[in-house]
Amino acid sequence: MSNVSNKSKQITAARALVNCLALEKVSTVFGYPGAAICPFYDELSKSNIEHILVRHEANAGHAASGYARITGKAAVCIATSGPGATNLITAIATAYMDSIPMICITGQVNTDQIGKDVFQEADITGAVESFVKHSFLIKDAQDLPETVRKAFYIASTGRPGPVLLDIPIDVLRTDIDFDNVKYMEQVDIRGYKPNFHGNKLQIKRVIEAIETADKPLICAGGGLFNREAYKLMRQFAEHADIPVISTMMGISALPTEHPLYYGMIGMHGKGIANRAINNCDLLILLGARVNDRAVLALKNNDSLKVIHIDIDPAEIGKNLPASIPVVGDLRAVLEQLLEQLPKKKHENWKKLLKTDTGSDTLDMPSKTDKINPKQFINILNRLLPEESVIVADVGQNQIWTANNISLSEHGRFITSGGMGTMGYSVPAAIGAKKAAPEKEVIAICGDGSFQMQMMELATAIQHNINIKIIIMKNNRLGMVRELQQNLYNNNCTAVNLDGSPDFVKIAAAYGINGDYVTDIKQADKALITLLASKKPYLLQINIDENEKTM
Amino acid sequence: MPTSPRITTQKEYFMKHTISILVENHAGVLSRISGLFARRGFNIHSLAVGVTENEKVSRITIVAEGDDYTLEQIEKQLNKLIDIIKVRSVKGSELLSRELMLIKVTCTAVQRPELIAIAELCGAKISDVSKETVTLELSDNEARITTFEELLKPYGIREIARTGFIALQKGSGSISS
Ligand SMILES: Cc1ncc(C[n+]2csc(CCOP(=O)(O)OP(=O)(O)O)c2C)c(N)n1
């Protein structure tokens, strides 16, 4: 059966929507049905587009997010009206905070019932207003194709982000004219004209600043993954011999072992990266919005010059004042810069960083019989294939992974950076694996966060998605517990996870193999089995519950 | 480093700004804009909406209070809204701004001539008269509207309705130029 109908003819808007997705080259979508979205599912099932049935709508969004981060294109998630749509909200907010291109399709009640509080009605466009890039409530079926085209355009250009399409069921059922050729015409939205190239004068000022700087430093952000700009960043850093640090979103933009890389900054970042940012004389922010947790480390430094290159003018000067702002697409701006960039050597500056005496001991052996998670990650690093995607959840497990994982130039680190949404790793890994089946995709989470997403084991099994899961079990909401120890007089409350199941047995109940690691000596063997498995596999590692985040 | 962004929520230099916005004439646009102001802590003093010379485009005029950092953020965030075509904040001195006020005051037959004189002096119109009240209308700038209100206070103000300010740039310039 063909995906796309020929020529202009009358079809239902539901059918047209499926055709639009096919024309946008969407091959996989993530969703969960319900009455209001049924006309669309009916048509979707007749197309070549694969539907991944998740077990909770939030996870449809997270899976789409993981998929989008690997493909670099807008990914699609679907939910029904009312509770389906509201369940999706956390995922939309999570994607918004990390600038992930996403199309969220929600069913809606009949047009003439909107506003009457009928069964399963929710004002979803109103509810998500503050964390979508844009939203459309499609009231006229004939507008659907053009609206879908605009949605993809808005989601994936400029600063990417989620766009919501809310479609009443009667609209989906209405016959409309649909024309493939017309659909593909260029979109023009007069209120939306994202900058692309950097201003020439500003580019010149950037070059001059780099020319004269003695201690320049690049701070790599998540924006570098758009259009593979990170590859140009590497050329840029190598050519001008500029050390690189990253935000959490920017991890893996440069290979971890690259001689110019000094780790993640911020509240939970590496000491050396935080000291570098305070000692540099020129800070070059590339697609990083340097949020409060990231800039915390930056002490007042009056002589510091800041170059901020970002696609979103609203990010420039928001958290950190910029001496030289450049608004534009990072890849385009880096191309412009590479044309004029002087060849430089910064031996003294690098020597200063190298001889940094602060300590960042990461491989401390555990004091108890339990496992030191940092040491465990180091063992994983030794065994990890070149092409791996690591999806870290939220909590101590996230920081241990972020600070210790070693990824090659083909590796990728993914996490919920801006929102810190627990329960992100497994569904995002499912999405990432769908996008890159050839890569090893591993979700690393805590025992708390795993219990927010363990229903997705079914999704992985049902759709043969070969993800691997590592649960760092400390029987605590570790990061909150640590906060209570440090700031609330050791009053550790509501952080004990007694009552948690045996996760290996849970996996077995879904038909997923797994194993326990209770002693670091078992780690090698267990990880080799995990990596060799051609089916989903789960490891429960019993880590030292007293291990500190930093 | 150049001047630092505002970190405290303290009310420093809260200046009034007039922001003119051209938007697509769609449902939901106004809620996106007012929501943005609320979220970013920018207090709306007045807000007026109406269509422009092009029926598909509305003009929203907002007078708001905030410091320069917040104003810059608001402008940038407004520009990110897809339905917004143009944003321009203009200094008071470069603006021709007007607000319409309806004001109902207590006024006996004896007091009427006096009130009519005040209205004439201020360029206001008598819009409605009853046995014990008079309703006046005045379209003017902020200072003169305030003066007018002050002058009427002694009579006893029953009710006031104001439209919020609308504004255009002085001279031949326009929001799009
Ligand atoms: C959805 C959600 N709820 C609550 C939090 C607050 N929170 C941050 S870290 C954390 C603890 C996570 O515990 P666990 O998953 O066991 O990981 P650990 O810190 O022990 O590694 C919590 C509750 C959050 N980030 N996300």
Image (cartoon, coloured by chain):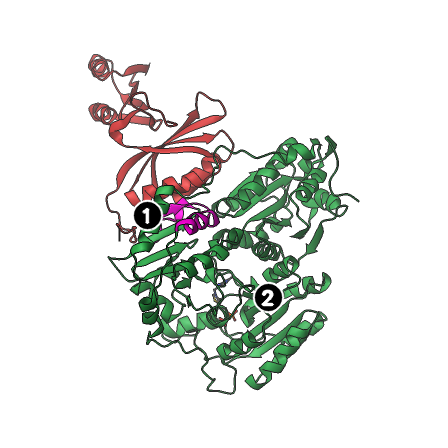
Chain B takes which shade in the image?
red
Q: Amino acid at mark 1?
A: Arg
Q: Is residue B171 above or below residue A366?
A: above
Disc 1 packing (10 Å; few <14; some 14–19; many ≥20): some
The residue marked by circle 2 belongs to what chain?
A
In percent of the image, x 50 and y 63: which residue is there?
A252
Residue on which disc 2 sits: A387
**Residue B76 visible somewhere in the drawing:** yes
Highlighted range, magenta: A312-340
The image shows residue B91 at horizontal and vertical percentages of: 27, 32
Which quadrant does the C terminus of chain A fall into? bottom left
Query: Is residue A291 in the magenta section?
Result: no
Q: Amino acid at mark 2?
A: Glu
Disc 2 packing (10 Å; few <14; some 14–19; many ≥20): some
Query: Is residue A337 in the magenta section?
Result: yes
The residue marked by circle 1 belongs to what chain?
A
Give the structural element (helix, strand or loop) at label 2.
loop
The image shows residue A363 at horizontal and vertical percentages of: 46, 80
Foreground mark, 1 or 2, reads 1
Which quadrant does the N terminus of chain A fall into? top right
The quarter holding residue A147 reads: top right
Q: Is residue A324 above or below residue B89?
A: below
Question: Does residue A250 appear left or right of residue A74 in this picture?
Answer: left
Chain A takes which shade in the image?
green
Residue on which disc 1 sits: A205
**Residue A321 visible somewhere in the drawing:** no
